[in-house]
Image (cartoon, rainbow, N blue to C red):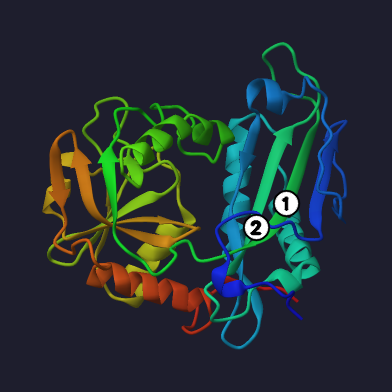
Amino acid sequence: MAVNLDWGNLGFGYIKTPYRYVARYKDGKWSEGELTADDKIVLTECAGVLQYAQTAFEGLKAYTTKDGKIVTFRPDLNAERMEQSAARLEIPIFPKEKFLEAVDKVVAANREYVPPYGSGATLYIRPFIFGSSAVIGVKPAQEYEFRMFCTPVGPYFKGGIKPISIRVSDYDRAAPHGTGHIKAGLNYAMSLYAIVDAHEKGFDENMYLDAATRTYVEETGGANFIFVTKDGKVVTPKSDSILPSITRRSLCYVAENILGMTVEHRPVRFEEVKDFAECGLCGTAAVISPVGKIYDHGKEVCFPSGMTEMGPVTKKLYDTLTGIQMGRIPAPEGWIREIK
């Protein structure tokens, strides 16, 4: 039985739930891992995460489907991406099988916090991993913690999905051969100044261009771009410094294999953007945020889809993917993991 929350009016914020998962790495191996009711973390002041930002995280959701099941969406891809992030940051890899076991345990233990079907709310799951032992020289920590908590969240868009305005940022999100392709906490820390500045100037997000030439579209601080051409093709930017979004990969599969559309995953020059019919930002939190306008240092790129509603192709992609997540549309093999 769900707890007594006003599901339809939840914000996108943190609400403490009863249980979370923790595993610890020490003496070259991970502990068994367990659920705990304790939401506090006790660290040495010299912990690797505090000194040198040795941490990575993930984000996924649990849903109540149309037929009343509790499910997660492609958590195996989150597990694999966390393995890649850990490897790049010299963090011991937390095994995929253990990650999936943690997802199952955390959602099952907090099942009364999974919002009901049709409420627009979901259970957001946050796995994270960090260096916990003392490090004063610049080197990896010797001990680590893997943790996972969950919190019920409302729909990302209050009052319906409306196109947003974004700007081309003067700041760089990620360097070539850097850490842009992994979900490292440090990538998000350096984006905070730019997003606060964007908000203060009346924009919803930043469009980051490639750091090397500033001619190719990369992503925003927390989402991949997806474009639609005037003849109905789906185009997503390709770069070694873009985070491989699970939502983006899923939308491209939906476009090609369910909706029969042509999909191109390739480098996208910023000068091409004015010729697209639709633009969106895709990620776990919102699925797709439609973009109506891009501001480029005094010039504006306005998409034909406008500032009032999601473009028709973007809407079809959004409706299909959310339909799969909520059990209204049959899912491709292996996409849905039921929580018993």
Q: Is residue 241 in view from this perspective? A: no
Query: Callout 1: few (<14), some (14-19), or many (20+) C-alpha neighbours within 10 Å?
Result: many
Q: Quadrant of the N terminus?
A: bottom right
Residue 34 x, y percent position in the rendering: 87, 54
Q: Is residue 138 left or right of residue 289?
A: right
Q: Quadrant of the C terminus?
A: bottom right
**In the displayed structure, would residue 59 be above or below residue 113?**
above
Tell me where residue 304 sits by quadrant: bottom left
User: Residue drawn at (74%, 13%), measured in percent from left and top?
Assistant: 136
Query: Callout 2: few (<14), some (14-19), or many (20+) C-alpha neighbours within 10 Å?
Result: many
**Camera-side residue of 107 and 329:** 107
- The residue identified by callout 1 is 148
**In the displayed structure, would residue 321 be above or below residue 135?**
below
The numbered dot on residue 125 is 2
Distance between mark 1 and mark 2 Cα atoms: 7 Å
Tell me where residue 60 sits by quadrant: bottom right
Q: Is residue 296 in view from this perspective? A: yes
Residue 301 x, y percent position in the rendering: 15, 48
**Camera-side residue of 10 and 105:** 10
Evaluate if marks 1 and 2 touch, with contact meaning CB atoms under 8 Å apart: yes
User: Residue drawn at (63%, 27%), measured in percent from left and top?
Assistant: 53
